Image (tube, rainbow, N blue to C red):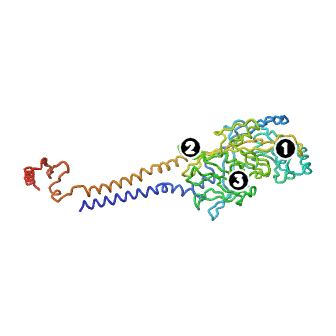
Amino acid sequence: MEAKKTKIGLLVGGFVLALAGLALSMFFEQIIFYQFEQELPLKPGSQSFKKWRLTPVPITTSVYFWNWTNPHEMSQADYKPSFVEMGPYVFREIHEKVNLSWNPNGTVTFRTIKRWYFVEEKTNGSLDDNVTSLNAVAASVAYIVRGWNRFFLYPVSIALVTSGQELTWTKTVRELLFDGFDNTLQNIGSYAPGLPALDKFGWFYKRNGTVSADTYTIGTGENGLNEIGELKLWNYRKLSDMYPECSNTGGYSGEFWPPKRKKEDVLKMFTTELCREVLYYYEEESTFRGLKTYIYAGTNLTMDNGTKVLENKCHCDQDFCPPSGVFDVSKCQFGAPVFMSYPHFYNADPYYRNSMRGMHPDKNKHRFYIALEPRTGLQVDIRARMQVNLYLKKNSALSMYSQVKEGFIPVFWMENSVSLSEEYTQGIKIMLKIVEFGPFIYYGMIGLGCLIILGVIFLHFFAPPITEDHKRNGKIQSGSEKVIFNKGEEIQLTGHDENEINDVEYKFSEVKL
């Protein structure tokens, strides 16, 4: 009876172990990632909120200026502008989210403060280096009024001359970036409606340490992790005023990506400087600090002018759609002739490099890429690289621009780089290692459970029965043909003849129970 209970207990235990292993195989990964995913949505007090509100890892911003070395040779018939790269001028960049408003529909509205701190020891050069580049203010005026009647262009031409404007300017790096410098076209709006009137000009003038003018509303992930970081509204609107025909305020803010990334995914990131979403395509698999990553990068499709990617067509001006490789962001920059590209016109039509000197595109130096850990969707390494170019437009009605050679003039390019430290990646690696080890656990449980079940079945059908006499006097070992007595005495049975059996019976009689 006890043996029967033991078999039943083992049989039940084997079934339970196998079923538990089977259930674990179905939910093991979800169990491991459950706590991680609980902390992922943006909500006050969560780990992701703390890291999102104030960047835990400083962004390294490197600025490279293009020094225009031969503007005085423009009158030559075979003229090509020549440029020399200067820098990098390195800054440590911190982002802080302010004016937060939590909305009942699973979104949060906020603005951003960006702070830049100069890192002299990593800089090649000085902020007092002089750079010669295209006069952005005068070029903007000339570009905005390009379609005006000649009668109205005459006073603009006079204003450009009397205000002392020249085709180029030579300024220090600090003036061109954050400090700004006085420009005599103070009331520029009267010459080119739409351009803001500023007391100084600088590419990032009054942007260091000030609250951004842009307001963002993004998904918190409360309604599903696929919505975390998804841009819902930009300046309280779903559509861009600059490109009303394009549904281009979608995509993600670029700080969060949903988990479970696939190679066929296309990352859609909204870029404020371009007033539109930009597409990044899977390019290769790589590793970062021991983590497997998917690299999504800006390709020739990203900067396509609509020839290959039809949805890009609506961003191209009907009157002027340049070859693939640049984004026309003039509508996003008050009408100024600003065109964005990758540094050195990487992944652009050869037209750009062939029309000037000094461009040497290199994938390792100039590619824009985002490295994601695919299971968690975490960004582990980013190199955001973009170049600012101005379009020099010829205009016979404006004396300053009547003899210029039309074309693109690169001004500067920037690299924003951020990488997760070993401390952050270590936690991810441990979690992924546990998931990787999971099959050994649940398949082992299933295998052990099945072995126990098979063992019980084998004993039930093939093991010799145990009689009451065996329990009292000893046991017969199968295969060895031995009779073992309680006192340890044994007799080997060889032929099983009658004399041996009688002898065994005689010895049984001598055993004292």
In this rendering, position of residue 501 left or right of residue 194:
left
Res 169 → quadrant: top right
Quadrant, the N terminus: bottom left
Q: CA distance from mark 1 to mark 3?
A: 28 Å
Mark linked to residue 276: 3
Q: Amino acid at mark 3?
A: Arg
> Where's residue 283, x and y in %?
60, 45
Q: Which residue is mark 1?
A: 394
Question: Which one is nearer the viewer's eye here, 260 or 486?
Answer: 260
Q: Amino acid at mark 2?
A: Ser
Q: Amino acid at mark 1?
A: Lys
Question: Would you call the spot at circle 3 few (<14 residues within 10 Å), some (14-19), or many (20 or more)?
Answer: many
Q: Earlier in the sequence, mark 2 or mark 3?
A: 3
> Where's residue 15, x and y in %?
36, 59
Q: CA distance from mark 2 to mark 3?
A: 28 Å
Tag 2 and tag 3, C-beta contact below 8 Å: no
Mark linked to residue 318: none
Q: Secondary structure at mark 2?
A: strand
Mark linked to residue 286: 2
> Where's residue 248, x and y in %?
70, 56
